[in-house]
Structure formats: structure tokens, C-alpha cells
Amino acid sequence: MAYLSSVFPGHFPAHGASPGWDGLPPERRFAEERSRCFAPAWQLAGHSQELRARGDYLTIELATTRALIVRDAARTRAFDNSCPNQPHALVMARRGKLAGAISCPLHRLSFALDGTPADPAASAPLVALELAVTGGLLCVAPAGAAAAPRFLPGGETGEPARVINETVEFSEHEVLADWKIAIEQLLLHRMPEHEVQGGVQNFGAPELASDPAGHQLRWRAVPGTDTNGTGADGAAWQRMYQWPNILLEWRPDGVSAIQVIPLTAGQSRWQCLEYAYRDPDARTQEQGARARAGRSEALRLDIDLASSTQRGLASPGYRASHQGSVPSGIAAFRQLLATQLR
Ligand code: FES
């Protein structure tokens, strides 16, 4: 640190100095956020039912690792998806089927589906990641991570009873907004206060529960009238925010998630996953299709508002007026953030 602070004055704390958070340059703050908030976190990778047969795989680029999840005969495993010889991904596609081995596309260095070397040139196995299934969703974390979060509305772990359709929607959006602005925008739009005031969806009195130990916020509400196209059949929707970057929504027709990945200070990638249940009745299916259209519209709005907020913060003429109270979801997020960065 003493050396770095002499070579890059102002970018690293001088020996013995303890500068305030605000005094650090943005790239240093970003590095701290990534290592304190994201490196130990469990992250969403897909759904367990996407991997139905031997060789089926999923890949995903996360904040501090890229993950490859592979189904072997009876077991599913997760690895760091990096070639040992070059820092590129071993497997590039989001989803597919491996013919019995994991091979680098360049020199064909290969590994068995359990990660062990299948080539004399490979001197070590692939780096294993922790893998957990919670509410049917596949989550990965670095080896030795704390227990996985519980995603199901009742807090159960493992597989859900419902079967999902094979058609899965996965999309990624690069957004010119910092991950913190992205999360605040999503919480503002999707947690209670906004819904009460008439958001994209229309719900009756929502209930918000906070679980500080599990780093979660849970929201439960029943759709109101049919004006939003989702019907009023009395079935509750549940939304959940999982620290630091996952928003989940459970509905009668399926489950969807948005995961915000920090790319740089001021830029993030939003990963959107949509799973529809295979067997809902015709009415629920129709409501699901209409709600899906509403979700795309809401996502577009959230991306536009988050990018615009980022530009607004950078504008020298902008002064926040601090009118009104901070919504409860955002207050809870700021509290968690402050605890991690203390
Ligand atoms: S670059 Fe991957 S094995 Fe050579």
C-alpha cells in the first residue's frame, strides 16, 4: 500500500492513513464493493430443471467468477468456467449439452464431467464452486461460502413441486447505471410503497417482511382488479430481494428473477430469468402471458430510469431536495450496504 500510494498518489491510502469512504477514488470503492459484497455472495445461475440429462450444462458470468454448472450421471456440479491456460471461458454458450467432456475450444485441453483432468496436459482438476438448489433455483458460491439463502416463500430448500416448461427465457442487458442505483430503482418500483401508489402492477395491501439475518426482504400481495391484466383470483404473488443483487418474483404461473452484476463503477449487467410452470390452468396461463408483457415494459422503464438517475448524479447542476421519507425497501438496502462497507 505504501508503494502503491507513492506511485499513484490519491488512489491508495498512505501508510497508516484511514481515509473516509468518500475520499477514495471511484475505482477503489468499486473494488472494495465487489470484494466485500459480491465475492462471498451466493449467486443465481439457472433452474435445476434446465439440466435434465447427463452432459446438460449452463454457464453464467457473475461479478467475481464465471460459472459452469454440469449434470453428470446423478449429480450436478459447478466449476469456475475458466481455461487454466488462458483467462477465457472454457464453455461459451449459455446452455447446451457436452459430449462427455469439458474441453477448451482452442487446444482441446479436456476434463471429465466431474472436473478431473482427462488429458495428460491438464495438471489439476477444474476449480469447484459450491452449488445449492433453493426453490428449484441453482445457486453458486465460492468454496467455503456460508449456507445458501432460502428462496422459497416458506423458507424451504430443495426442489419445488412444480415442473417448469422447457422454454426458458434468459436475457442480459448492459445498463449505464451503477449496481447500487440499479438495485434502488428495482426496489423502488417493485416493493410496497410504489405498488400502493399505482405502479405497473396493481395490488391490494401488500405486506413487507424483513429478515436481516438472512439478508432478505419479502413482499407478499394479491393482485387487485383486472385492470393490470393479471386477474383477481385471490392467489398471492411473492417478491423477494436477496442481498446483494437478486430480485425474485413467485406467481401462480411461474417464477422470474433479475440479478444485477456490477461491471465497473457506474455500469452494470442485468440478467433476467423467466420460468413458466408447465401445468397452470388456461386462465392462469393467459394471465401469465399478459403479466409477461407487463414485465418487459417494467424492465424497459427500470433500465431507462436507472441510466437517467446515473446521468443525473453526474450532472453538476443537480441538487437533491431530500423531500419525503425513504421507502422501506431502499432504507433496508442502504442499511445492509453500510454494514458491509463499514
Ligand atoms: S487456451 Fe485453453 S487449452 Fe490452450
Image (tube, grey):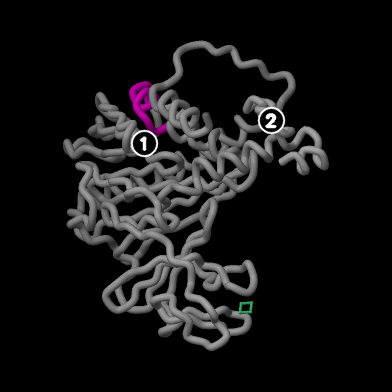
Please state which amino acid type lies under the numbered disc 1. His
Q: Which residues are magenta?
A: 189-198
Residue where numbered disc 1 is placed: 215
Determine whether, in the image, residue 87 is placed left or right of residue 63. right
Q: Quadrant of the N terminus?
A: top right
Say which residue appears at 34% left-offset and 66% top-offset.
50
Up-down relation of residue 108 to residue 265 (above or below):
below
Q: Position of residue 99 (x, y in %)?
A: 42, 84
Residue 327 located within the stretch drawn in magenta: no
Residue 143 visible in rendering: yes
Residue 193 located within the stretch drawn in magenta: yes
Say which residue appears at 37% left-offset and 21% top-offset.
197
Please state which amino acid type lies under the numbered disc 2. Gly
SS state under label 2: loop
Residue 227 visible in rendering: no
Determine whether, in the image, residue 320 is placed left or right of residue 65. right
The numbered mark, 1 or 2, whose residue comes first in the sequence reads: 2
> Is disc 2 surrounded by few (<14), some (14 to 19) or many (20+) residues within 10 Å?
few
Q: Position of residue 262 (x, y in %)?
A: 56, 45
The front one of 123 and 264 is 123
Q: Considering the whole magenta stretch, tell me its main secondary structure.
A: helix
Determine whether, in the image, residue 201 is placed left or right of residue 93. left
Residue where numbered disc 2 is placed: 16
Say which residue appears at 48% left-offset and 34% top-offset.
340
Is the CB atom of the residue marked by disc 1 within 8 angstroms of ligand 1's nearest atom?
A: no
The front one of 254 and 62 is 62
